Amino acid sequence: MSSEKARVVQLFATCLGDLVFPEAVADAESLLGEAGFEVEFPPRQTCCGQPAFNAGHRAAARRVAGSFVRAFSRHAPIVCPSGSCATMVSHYLPELVGCQPFDVWELSSFLDAHGGELPRRNEGRKLAYHDSCHMLRELRVADAPRNLLQRSGAELVPLGRADLCCGFGGTFSVRQPEVSVAMADDKLAAAEAADALVTADPGCLMHLRGRAARVGGPPIIHLATALARGA
C-alpha cells in the first residue's frame, strides 16, 4: 500500500454482513475510522460470487463476480470483515473473470498491520477465538485476530482443537446437518471457560450463534464487534 493510498480504504460488506450482521460491518467501519482511515463504501457492491463458485456454478459465479469488479476501484485497498469472502476475492475471482488481482485484506490482518493502538475495551475479559477454515488455511491468517484481542486487553482462553471446522462449511451444514450440529456442539463445549467466543467470519458466526441459541453456550461475537464495543 503506497503512502498516497495509505489513508483510504474501501469496505466490502459481504452478503451476510449486509443482510444478517450489519452491526459487524458498522463496527468494522468504526475501527477503520478510529485507526485513521477514510472509509469508502462503494454503493454498487454486491456478492463476490463465492456461493455459486463453491457450488460449482461457474457461469453464475462469473456473472456475479463481474459485478464486484465493476463496483470496486483499484485506487485503494479493499478491507473485508470475512475470511471466506476475502479468500474468494484474493484467490479465485481474478482467474474466474480474467482481471488483475485486487489489493484485498481481511479486516484483522489489515488492522494488525496498519491500525496502530487499540482502545482496551476488553480489559479483564476472557475470550476464546475460533479460526475459520478459509481464513486459516487459505489466507494463512491466525495471529492477527489474536494479536488484536490481546491488544484490546483480553485474556485469550485456549480453544481445544481450534483449527477444526465449526460445522458450517456453506452448504455442508444443509447437506450434512447431523454432522454439522455435532461439530458446532464440540466447538461450543471447547469455549465453555470463556466469557465469549469470537470469530472473524460471518458464516461461522451465524452457525455457532444459531446453535448456541438452541443448546446454550457463551455469547458468539464477530471480531469487529469485540474490538469496537467490547465482548
Image: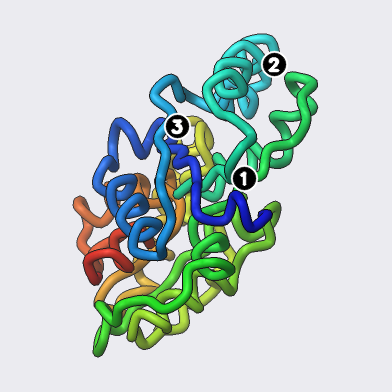
For residue 216, which numbered disc appears in the image?
A: none
Residue drawn at point x = 48 percent, y = 49 percent: 167
What's the residue type where badge 2 is placed? Arg
Comparing marks 3 and 1, which lies closer to the viewer? Answer: 1
Q: Say which amino acid is labelled 3.
A: Val
What is the spatial separation of the Cα atoms under label 2 and label 1, in whole angstroms?
Answer: 22 Å
Residue under the point 41% across and 82% down: 151
Question: Badge 3 is on which residue?
Answer: 174
Give the CA separation, mark 2 to mark 3. Answer: 21 Å
Whole-percent x, y for residue 90 in the image? 68, 41
Earlier sequence position, callout 2 versus callout 3: 2
State the residue at coordinates (36%, 53%).
Answer: 28
Residue toward you, 99 or 87: 99
Tell me the number on the disc at residue 104. 1
Under circle 2, the secondary element is helix
Q: Position of residue 108 (x, y in %)?
A: 50, 62
Q: Residues within 10 Å of mark 3 (few under 14, many from 20)?
A: few
Say whether residue 6 is left or right of residue 18: right
Q: Are marks 3 and 1 in contact (CB under 8 Å)?
A: no
Residue assigned mark 2: 58
Closer to us: 62 or 197? 62
Number of residues whose C-alpha sits closer than 10 Å to that of mark 1, classed few (under 14), some (14–19) or many (20 or more):
many
